[in-house]
Image (spheres, rainbow, N blue to C red):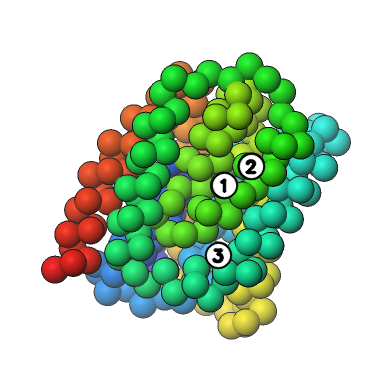
């Protein structure tokens, strides 16, 4: 039970911070020899998805009318890439080497956001690029929020818009992954799963507020140092 609570806390802390929650789940599972299936990891992501519903409940209805096409386009691109490379991507969830390289890659992306301060509204082309970035972030170690927010900033999209769009775009991706993986292994929610699920919700709500302040203050690149250090450390661990 303690192991499941630990993974729930890890998910809640890292899901919205640009440090790759899936990568951190793999790290803790590998280092502490915790045996869980991919469905549980996705279920934890679903827990933090519920946080989005709590956090954005006012914006969801308003923005759904404004961005429904953009969310649809981005989701199709994410889903198509994820489906085509499903087997390859799934195999990476047991590889510390993949996580370490993903974190190092994330650090480089985050470092490059330092000078970007967008002033344009979100458009169709932006949603295509952000959807593709989200697909790349399926790789454990590559931060979903880091990739999508950074891509939006590179596209000169306003900080507030790219922050909200990034997490609204995650909703169909996480829900779709839960249904797809659940259909393969069965929707097996035992007591430990539920406990980890609840832990991810509580901690996830706290960390999402924290990330919003970071994006506003243009300090996203600070997490690049963390990703670089952890990535290099895990690279050495995976080699030895």
Q: Position of residue 181 (x, y in %)?
A: 61, 74
Cα separation, mark 3 vs mark 1, equals: 22 Å
Q: Please provide percent x and percent y for residue 178.
A: 63, 67
| Disc 2/disc 3 C-alpha distance (Å) | 26 Å
- Picture quadrant of residue 182: bottom right
Label 1 residue SS: helix
Image quadrant holding the N terminus, namely: bottom left
Q: Which residue is mark 1?
A: 133
> Which quadrant of the rendered structure holds the C terminus?
bottom left
Numbered circle sitting on residue 129:
2
Residue named by callout 3 = 43
* Image coordinates for residue 166, horizontal then vertical, percent: 61, 39
Mark 3 vs mark 1: in front: 1
Cβ–Cβ under 8 Å for marks 1 and 2: yes
Name above or below for residue 161 compared with residue 217.
below
| First-in-chain label (2 vs 3) | 3
Classed neighbour count for the residue bearing mark 1: other residues with Cα under 10 Å, few (<14), some (14–19), many (≥20):
many
């Amino acid at each position: 039970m303690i192991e499941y609570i630990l993974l729930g806390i890890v998910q809640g802390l890292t899901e919205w911070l640009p440090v790759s929650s899936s990568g951190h789940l793999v790290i803790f599972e590998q280092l502490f020899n915790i045996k869980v299936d991919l469905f549980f990891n996705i279920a934890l992501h679903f827990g933090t998805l519920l946080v989005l519903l709590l956090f954005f409940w006012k914006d969801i209805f308003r923005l759904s009318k404004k961005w429904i096409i953009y969310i649809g386009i981005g989701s199709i691109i994410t889903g198509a890439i994820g489906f085509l490379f499903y087997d390859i991507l799934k195999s990476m969830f047991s590889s510390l080497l993949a996580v370490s390289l993903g974190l190092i890659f994330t650090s480089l992306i985050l470092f490059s956001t330092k000078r970007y301060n967008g002033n344009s509204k979100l458009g169709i082309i932006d949603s295509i690029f952000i959807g593709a970035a989200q697909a790349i972030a399926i790789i454990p170690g590559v931060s979903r929020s880091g990739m999508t927010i950074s891509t939006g900033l590179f596209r000169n999209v306003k900080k507030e818009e790219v922050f909200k769009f990034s997490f609204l775009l995650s909703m169909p991706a996480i829900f779709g992954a839960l249904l797809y993986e659940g259909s393969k292994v069965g929707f097996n929610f035992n007591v430990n799963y539920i406990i980890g699920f609840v832990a991810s919700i509580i901690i996830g709500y706290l960390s999402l507020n924290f990330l919003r302040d970071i994006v506003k203050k243009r300090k996203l690149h600070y997490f690049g140092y963390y990703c670089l250090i952890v990535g290099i450390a895990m690279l050495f661990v995976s080699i030895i």
